[in-house]
Amino acid sequence: MQFGGRYELAATRHAVWQALNDAATLKAAIPGCSRLEWTSPSALECELKVNLGIMQPSFTGDLELRDVVAAERYTLVGRGRGGLLGKAEAAANITLSDSAGGTRLEFTAEAGADGGIMKLGKALIGSSAQKVIDGFFERFAAAMGAPLTVLPPH
């Protein structure tokens, strides 16, 4: 499953980068997140409950930052464990660039799952995941105090 989005935040690229690397800001922006903490300079551990419509499984997960170029881009790789529901994995590429209104953030992600999660159906998960992503960026911008504009796809 693939997801993505393009956003403009009315903040400097440095401020957006700082917020993308601040566990408290990220935790506030992630729906259902009860814990998010750095375990090394490039890794985080989290616990969250995901709303998949008919189910709300809890996941524990590990996040790793790869290919980091400060204030420009990184790849965030995550692996979650949902007990009986199985495992989920995702990789997200986040790129920042200057724009007339502040900072343009481009996000692309690919996710997969196994076990009971897949039995719920890709359409349900896909639409729920995109809602989670869109909601994340709205809450992220609010936590930064920066107005957000959703840009049309390429």
Image: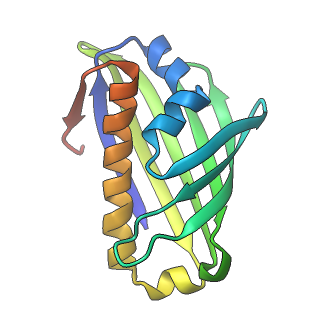
Count of numbered marks: 0
Please name the colour scheme applied to the rendered image: rainbow
Which picture quadrant has residue 68? top right
Q: Residue 14: x and y, percent?
A: 49, 12
Residue nearer the viewer, 3 or 61: 61
Q: Residue at x 57, y 65 (%)?
A: 58
Q: Quadrant of residue 6?
A: top left
Q: Is residue 5 above or below residue 114?
A: above
> Residue reaching furthest bottom?
119
Please provide percent x and percent y for residue 114.
59, 80
Q: Residue furthest front?
A: 34
Residue 74: percent from left, percent from top: 58, 34
Seen in the image, is 40 located left or right of residue 99? right
Figure check: 6 above or below 133: above
The residue drawn where x is 39% and y is 72% is 125
State whether residue 28 is above or below residue 101: below
Position of the C terminus, as image quadrant, is top left
x 34%, y 76%: residue? 124
Quadrant including the N terminus: bottom left
* Residue in the image at 44% along x and 26% along y: 96
Q: Residue furthest right?
A: 40
The spot of residue 122 in percent (x, y) is 39, 78
